[in-house]
């Protein structure tokens, strides 16, 4: 809250200063983590008035010396709370140090330029993943959900005990979804595989402090893998989720989770490929593919990683990748989540992207090419809205895994799919100073992180840098270069403006930090205004920056914009690792 009061004071000072200078209030938004010397470095100036600035200066914070003076970018007009906005590009400046920007009456916070500016950030976000563990929770040093769970919809009698304790809680509630957990596990595995030197070894496999000779990110990925094995215990058995929306009746610490009328037992939903309960409605499940193929992809990547670490485990992963892929073929279609009381579910509507991922990672290249052509572009790209998790996992992981295995025309075709999708987002993003082309739907930060990863993958596989400013803009957005001037990650950076009052049981009940958790992010004003049971418990310190376009509140009462998510954080781990990996390169 101290940081938030400082933010409010900064806003007040900016307005008072503007009045004293007979000028309109204006602000400069930056990436609070900082910038790599050889990377793209752009801030955004936004004003309540319509008159643009002509130039800006970069100032050494220690000496007060103006080290760079440049013409401001073209006036890009109104965006959200700002009547005028411009991009301030200082990419040409590469000297390490601590600086601030000045443009008219607006002055940015201090920021660093350095090769190590992103070091340790990916590991920091693993703190949240460990805190989300079910079973033994290393943050609490206690166990929870040890009685999961009783079966529903399976080939066994309903209420049969199925031992599935483990994995991660999905968000600030304690539901556990196979689709998000498999995606999170895959991102963590890929982060270690693609950027192995980024991660440290400071924790044991159980999450407690202490080196065990294995990078913490791989320990965390294995926590996910071991749970996925429990959710796919037999070749013809696979479960989709533990618990349902009855969880939402109130906040409590994990080990006191008793919401289903059976003590501490929770329901475990079998994947049938058929619609399942959604209160007085049913979900729109059409098949088994979307969840099962994500299992296959995660298991297949793990098999390759563990080949030289734990050969028996690698062999088990190889076997399970095959059975999961076959389960995905059992009934081609999408598996949605089940909800009993509320209208909110993970309404996933696509599945061929998951099949491509499963096929590419298990060596079924011809099948992967066919699936890739069936959905060349993730459907939300270029669109203004989508249902909650409709096009999950927000980007096509299969294109990346497939392109790495291809050569010539086939490789160019798959990478062309990525380029087409990026161009659709760029068409919208190029019209505003923040280069924002991601829709403001629930979990917009997850989409933002995922889209930045796609831009990174495209650039790294093609060496085509035409979208690098767009890639950087999406990364910068998450750490403060947005209308609110706040990072969207709890506690990162330590000195910055970051969430302090998230919609989370740990902070609300225990006053405990949720270090590294990526919150949902801003939503359209009309979405926020129509949500059930939403309210703010404290004065809105970002009130000057809210608009009908988008709102964000650092308030426990706003479950739509300020709730952290496990899978979004796992995606961010990959993105931060990629930026750390490349930050020291020319």
Image: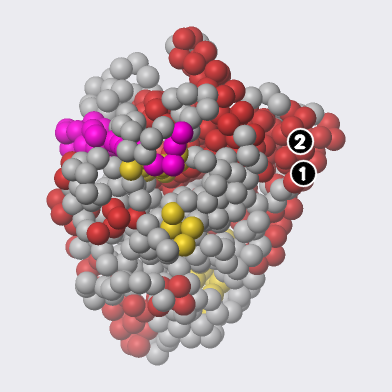
**Considering the image in quadrants, where does the N terminus appear?**
bottom left
**Residue 356 sits in which quadrant?**
top right
Q: Which residue is rendered at x = 56% and y = 28% of the image?
A: 324
Q: Which residue is rendered at x = 14% and y = 51% of the image?
A: 510
**Considering the image in quadrants, where does the C terminus appear?**
top right
Q: Which residue is mark 2?
A: 369
The residue closer to the viewer here, 464 or 327, is 327
Q: Is residue 56 left or right of residue 356?
A: left
Q: Which residue is rendered at x = 40% and y = 77% of the image?
A: 529
All told, the count of numbered labels is 2
User: Alpha-carbon distance for marks 1 and 2?
Assistant: 6 Å
Q: Secondary structure at mark 2?
A: helix
Q: Which residue is mark 1?
A: 373
Q: Which residue is rendered at x = 39% and y = 72% of the image?
A: 531
* Residues shaded magenta: 132-155
Query: Magenta stretch containing residue 141, yes or no?
Result: yes
- Picture layout, residue 72 above or below residue 361: below
Residue 378 rendering spot, x and y as whole percentages: 65, 52
Residue 112 rendering spot, x and y as whole percentages: 40, 50
């Amino acid at each position: 809250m101290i940081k938030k009061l400082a933010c409010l004071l900064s806003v007040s000072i900016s307005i008072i200063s503007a009045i004293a200078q007979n000028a309109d209030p204006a602000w400069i938004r930056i990436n609070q983590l900082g910038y790599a010397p050889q990377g793209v470095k752009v801030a955004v100036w936004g004003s309540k008035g319509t008159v643009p600035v002509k130039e800006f200066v970069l100032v050494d914070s220690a000496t007060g010396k103006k080290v760079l003076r440049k013409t401001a970018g073209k006036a890009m007009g109104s965006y959200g709370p700002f009547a005028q906005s411009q991009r301030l590009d200082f990419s040409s400046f590469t000297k390490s140090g601590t600086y601030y920007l000045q443009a008219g009456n607006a002055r940015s916070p201090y920021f660093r330029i350095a090769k190590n500016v992103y070091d340790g950030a990916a590991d920091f976000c693993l703190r949240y993943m460990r805190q989300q563990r079910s079973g033994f929770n290393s943050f609490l040093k206690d166990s929870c959900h040890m009685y999961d769970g009783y079966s529903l919809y399976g080939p066994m009698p309903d209420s049969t005990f199925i031992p599935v304790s483990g994995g991660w809680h999905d968000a600030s509630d304690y539901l556990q979804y196979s689709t998000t957990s498999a995606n999170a596990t895959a991102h963590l595995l890929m982060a270690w595989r693609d950027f192995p030197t980024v991660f440290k070894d400071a924790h044991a496999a159980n999450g407690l402090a202490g080196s065990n000779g294995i990078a913490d990110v791989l320990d965390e990925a294995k926590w996910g893998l071991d749970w996925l094995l429990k959710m796919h215990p037999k070749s013809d058995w696979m479960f989709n989720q533990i618990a349902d929306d009855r969880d939402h009746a109130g906040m409590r610490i994990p080990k006191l989770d008793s919401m289903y009328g059976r003590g501490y037992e929770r329901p475990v939903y079998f994947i049938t490929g058929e619609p399942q309960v959604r209160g007085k409605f049913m979900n729109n499940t059409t098949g088994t593919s979307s969840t099962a193929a994500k299992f296959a992809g995660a298991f297949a990547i793990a098999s390759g990683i563990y080949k030289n670490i734990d050969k028996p485990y690698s062999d088990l992963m190889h076997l399970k990748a095959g059975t999961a892929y076959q389960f995905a073929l059992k009934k081609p279609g999408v598996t949605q989540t089940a909800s009993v009381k509320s209208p909110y579910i993970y309404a996933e509507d696509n599945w061929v992207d998951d099949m491509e991922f499963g096929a590419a990672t298990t060596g079924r290249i011809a099948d992967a090419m066919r699936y890739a052509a069936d959905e060349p572009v993730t459907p939300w790209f270029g669109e203004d809205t989508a249902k909650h998790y409709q096009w999950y996992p927000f980007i096509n992981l299969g294109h990346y895994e497939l392109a790495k295995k291809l050569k010539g025309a086939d490789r160019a075709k798959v990478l062309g799919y990525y380029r087409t999708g990026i161009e659709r987002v760029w068409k919208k993003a190029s019209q505003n100073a923040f280069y924002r082309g991601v829709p403001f739907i629930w979990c917009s930060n997850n989409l933002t992180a995922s889209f930045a990863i796609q831009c990174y993958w495209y650039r790294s596989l093609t060496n085509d840098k035409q979208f690098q400013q767009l890639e950087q803009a999406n990364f910068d957005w998450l750490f403060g270069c947005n209308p609110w001037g706040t990072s969207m990650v709890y506690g990162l950076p330590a000195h910055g403006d970051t969430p302090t009052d998230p919609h989370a049981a740990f902070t609300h009940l225990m006053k405990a930090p949720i270090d590294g958790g990526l919150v949902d992010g801003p939503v359209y004003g009309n979405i926020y205004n129509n949500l059930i049971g939403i309210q703010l418990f404290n004065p809105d310190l970002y009130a000057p920056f809210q608009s009908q376009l988008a709102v964000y509140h650092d308030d426990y009462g706003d479950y739509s914009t300020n709730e952290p998510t496990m899978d979004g954080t796992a995606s961010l781990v990959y993105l931060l690792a990629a930026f750390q990996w490349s930050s020291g390169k020319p």
